[in-house]
Image (tube, rainbow, N blue to C red):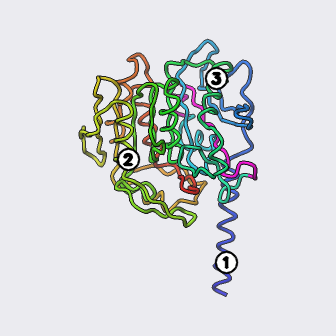
Amino acid sequence: MKHRGRRVVGVIFVVAIGFAWLAGRGCGADELPVPPRAGSFTVQLKSGGWDRTATVHVPAGYETTDRLPLVVALHGAGGDGSTMLRNNGWAAKADREKFIVVAPDGMSALPRLPNSLRANPNLWNSGQLGSRSPRARIDDVAFIDDLLDMLKDRLPYDERRVYVTGHSNGAGMTFRLGAELSERFAALAPVSGMLAVDDPRPKRPLPTLYIIGTLDPLQPIDGGEVTLPWGTKRTNVPVSDYLTRWAKAIDCSTEPKIVSDEAGIKRVEYPSNSGGPTVSAIYIEGQGPRMARRQFAFAREDDRPEDRQAEGGRRDLGFLSRQVRAEVSLARGRLAFLTTRSAWRLAFSRFAGTH
């Protein structure tokens, strides 16, 4: 009887998670209108022969004559754009700071089969996928390039102020965009993900901020074997290896310098060898275990970090202001701070070596 009760509880839990996930995805926003106006909308386009989608948020008070900054926000594996905008504060932040934010949707691991949160979740082709994976043959760099072109026509933005950030598998995609589409961005901020491009050669160096928790179970600071939610194992290299490789790619020193270490926030910097953009890394002490416990709690993306860590993020993250034009108000650390807050409020799925 006791075992039967446990099974019933288990079924109720799974069903509840499923309904919560469906509720989180909602019925979908309206298509971006012509002319554009403030609000959250979907956009659809063809890229590489595939139907692709994204959610775009136009800030309150928008005027069609505005040319606002644009942030591209990439979800982790198993996520989707609309949930990322809503549950991680991007839409509200865009309203306050007056910038446009677009959150593209990845595609299923098996793109010709129905999407399934656990069995066939959305992914980014960040370079982590095996060469035999059907998903690896879909070009997400081209998709983001096409998306930026479409938005330029339908929702004109300031092309000098385009930023990209992403979490987990989305962070890996952020790195790949920095490596292969650097001419379209002003800065990048990957969070808790890996650089999976073997030999990154960006056309131009970009200011880079990397953020990670010191206890991240799927991206351990010192590397090593990790067990993914599906029970498969993966061996990671140390996080410093990613950062060293990226620093070298944008002509920075491969020897980091500690900038500050207080209130649970350690910041290091890889200085430029030529007076150009730098690589900064933020290590948030103690973050990680809650993410591991919530690997399949897809609907619970609203947890906040402790106030102490959030305050540390407010003080320390100003990397964009040194590298982007001074008149760009967004570049005064706001993107970086929002990325820090958002990083530990995500609970996206991991899949087949990605997370």
How far apart are labels 3 and 1 at the CA level? 51 Å
What residue is shown at x 41% (from left), y 16% (from top)?
Answer: 327
The kind of secondary structure element at disc 3 is helix
Residue 307: numbered disc? 2
Residue 149: numbered disc? 3
How far apart are labels 1 and 2 at the CA level? 38 Å
The kind of secondary structure element at disc 2 is helix
Q: Give the vertical position of 240 relative to 3 (above or below).
A: above
The kind of secondary structure element at disc 1 is helix
User: Dividing the picture into quarters, in which one does residue 42 lie?
Assistant: top right
Task: Decide: few, some or many residues near mark 3? Use Cα within 10 Å; few <14, some 14-19, many ≥20.
Answer: few
Q: Is residue 98 visible?
A: no
Q: Which residue corresponds to mark 1?
A: 7
Q: Is residue 185 left or right of residue 1?
A: left
Q: Magenta residues? A: 92-114
Task: Decide: few, some or many residues near mark 2? Use Cα within 10 Å; few <14, some 14-19, many ≥20.
Answer: few
Among the two numbered marks 1 and 2 on one chain, the one whose residue lies closer to the N terminus: 1
View extreme (top): residue: 65
Location of the N terminus (image quadrant): bottom right
Tell me where residue 99 appears, x and y as whole percent: 54, 25
Q: Is residue 43 left or right of residue 251?
A: right
- Which circle, 3 or 1, is nearer the viewer? 3
Q: Is residue 160 visible?
A: yes
109 within the magenta span: yes
Q: Is residue 90 left or right of residue 81?
A: left
Q: Give the vertical position of 252 relative to 107 (above or below).
A: above
What residue is shown at x 44% (from left), y 29% (from top)?
Answer: 187
- Which circle, 1 or 2, is nearer the viewer? 1
Residue 51: numbered disc? none
Among the two numbered marks 3 and 1 on one chain, the one whose residue lies closer to the N terminus: 1
What residue is shown at x 37% (from left), y 24% (from top)?
Answer: 323
